[in-house]
Amino acid sequence: QESHSIFNLVRGMVETYHVRGNGQRRVTAFMFPNDLFGLSENGRYCMTAQAVTAVVAYRIPLVQLTQLMHNDPSLQLHLLCKACHEIRESQQHVLQIGHNEARARIAAFLLMLARRNHEVSHAEESLPAKFQVDLPMSRSDIADYSALTVESVSRALHALEELQLIRRVSAQRIVILDKEGLCREAGDF
């Protein structure tokens, strides 16, 4: 689809995905408030975006964005910082799915959600030792993002719970009981 705008997420969660030639869907990212999505390549959107929760987002026409960037160099810097952030997140995602163990992939996924949910950067390492993480996405979305099957996601969550690293409060919420142990399990992603 031709791209005419980008979007700034204000509230809620969006997932981006790509459908392969064989029909297999691959979730490429979860977007959180203050993230930009809808970037394009050669005038066409690269991914499909779908709301995971109720969403409020600003649509910014590319023509207006270009004009604003010419008039406001600080906006150029801000967008460059956003792009660098997305590149770092993508690199972490590649490392996560490159790990052989499903448990490690899911541990890394939970830590990523915790950081994003609590708006704490990875470098700050100031997440509390014990805290809740909301999982508004489906197990299928988690599987597509982590390059696993739904069954592997469920087994990995069960294994992390058996290790007393997490506790499942409901299908949409977990409590991280041992952040350091979860980091070790994730391989320090």
Image (cartoon, grey):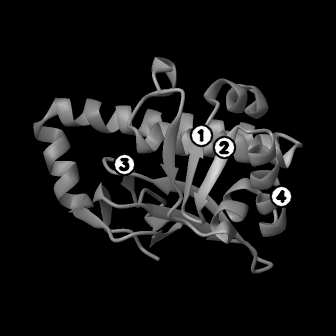
Residue 170 horizontal side relative to residue 158, left or right: left
Q: Nearer the viewer, residue 147 or 24?
A: 147
Left or right of 66 on screen, residue 130: right
Element on which disc 1 rests: strand
Give the residue number, with chain letter if any, for mark 3. Answer: 35
How far apart are the alpha carbons under marks 4 and 3? 31 Å
Mark 3: amino acid: Asp
The answer to which of 144 and 113 lies nearer the viewer is: 113
Q: Earlier in the sequence, mark 2 or mark 4?
A: 4
Label 4 environment density (alpha carbons within 10 Å; few <14, some 14–19, many ≥20): some
Residue 189 seen in this snapshot: no
Residue 104: percent from the left, percent from the top?
79, 40
* 10 Å crowding of disc 1: few (<14), some (14-19), many (20+): many
Image depth: mark 2 or mark 4 in front: 2
The answer to whether residue 158 of the structure is visible from this angle is: yes
Give the labeled residue for mark 1.
Answer: 176
In what element is the residue under mark 3? loop
Counting residues from the start of the chain, the first of labels 2 and 3 encountered is 3
* Rendered-image quadrant of the C terminus: top right
